[in-house]
Amino acid sequence: MSGHSHWATTHRAKGINDAKRGAIFTKYGRLITIAAREGGDPDMNYKLRLAIDNAKGVNMPKDNIERAIKAGTGENKDGAIIEEVLYEAYGPNQIAILIEGLTDNRNRAVNEVKTILTKNNGKFVPSGSVSFMFKRCGMIVFSLEKYKPEDLEMETIESGAEDFKLEDEVFLVITRVEDLQVVKTYFESKGYAPQSAELGYFPTQTVELSDADLEKYLKLKDLLEDNQDVSTVWDNLE
């Protein structure tokens, strides 16, 4: 599964160049803005608390976080209206792709995503074409540079989480959507600080790619993730 690429990118965010960092801050800011629409107090709005924690994980400045919250609560009247979008696509060798986005211009977003796909061995498909191959769930990520996998595995069993996966540099805990807060709180109570925690899409069916197709897909994924309106790219890569 290519999730490790998504989480490893987050893990390395502190060392990237200023231009890339600015784009990452924009995407995390939009996540905060969307969450803050349900209330600007992170103690009362767990979705907002998750978004803030993840933004802090990539060293997003406090002022940026506060502006994003105000944009969501309506205190900042000058902010553009941000909408959530979800696109479905196929990549090389029919790899299934879900593209989550946050945009202030739906027409621009869909046209740019379609263009990237068309020019890079991908195909935009109607809603429902690939989403049945994924399940919506909570995902909590721990760095294997900080914690031993055997310790995390034991705590996962005790936490009530559904499953876990080892993904290169990280240990991924998978929860039911409604259990994300409880499981994250359990780990924190045991002294484990997650690298990130979020709701996402985990594949129920996976595919393998040849080296040539994998190279094509990783190029496509990078181009999608670099787009200003794309927040996360999920796939069913083995």
Image (tube, rainbow, N blue to C red):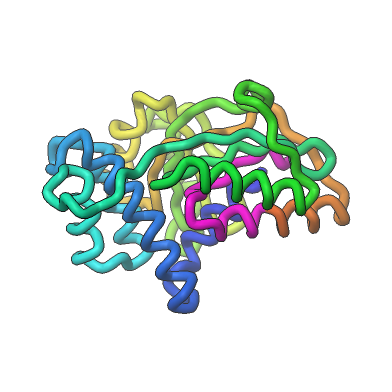
Does the segment drawn in magenta span residue 230?
A: yes
- Between 103 and 210, the one lying in front of the other is 103
Q: Which residue is drawn at 43% across and 70% down?
A: 21
Q: Looking at the picture, how far across and down is residue 35, in whole percent?
A: 27, 40
Residue 129 can be seen, yes or no? yes
Q: Looking at the picture, how far across and down is residue 215, in whole percent?
A: 79, 58
Q: What stretch is highlighted in magenta?
A: 221-238
Q: Which residue is drawn at 61% across and 53% down?
A: 224
Locate the C terminus by quadrant. Answer: top right
Compared across the picture, whether 80 is left or right of 90 comes to left
Q: Residue at x 53, y 37 (%)?
A: 164
Q: Looking at the picture, how far across and down is residue 81, in whole percent?
A: 31, 44
Q: Where 62 falls versus 95 (above or below)?
A: below
Residue 234 image-quadrant placement:
top right
Does the segment drawn in magenta span residue 3?
A: no
Q: Where 81 falls versus 181 (above or below)?
A: below
Q: Where 46 falls versus 56 (above or below)?
A: above
Residue 205 image-quadrant placement:
top right
Residue 166 can be seen, yes or no? no
Compared across the picture, whether 81 is left or right of 150 comes to left
Residue 46 image-quadrant placement:
top left
- Between 31 and 114, the one lying in front of the other is 114
Q: Looking at the picture, how far across and down is residue 166, in whole percent?
A: 59, 47
What is the tally of numbered marks visible in this picture? 0
Q: Where 27 falls versus 39 (above or below)?
A: below
Compared across the picture, whether 2 is left or right of 232 comes to right
Locate the N terminus by quadrant. Answer: top right
- Between 74 and 39, the one lying in front of the other is 74
Residue at the farthest front position: 107
Q: Which residue is drawn at 33% across and 57% down?
A: 55
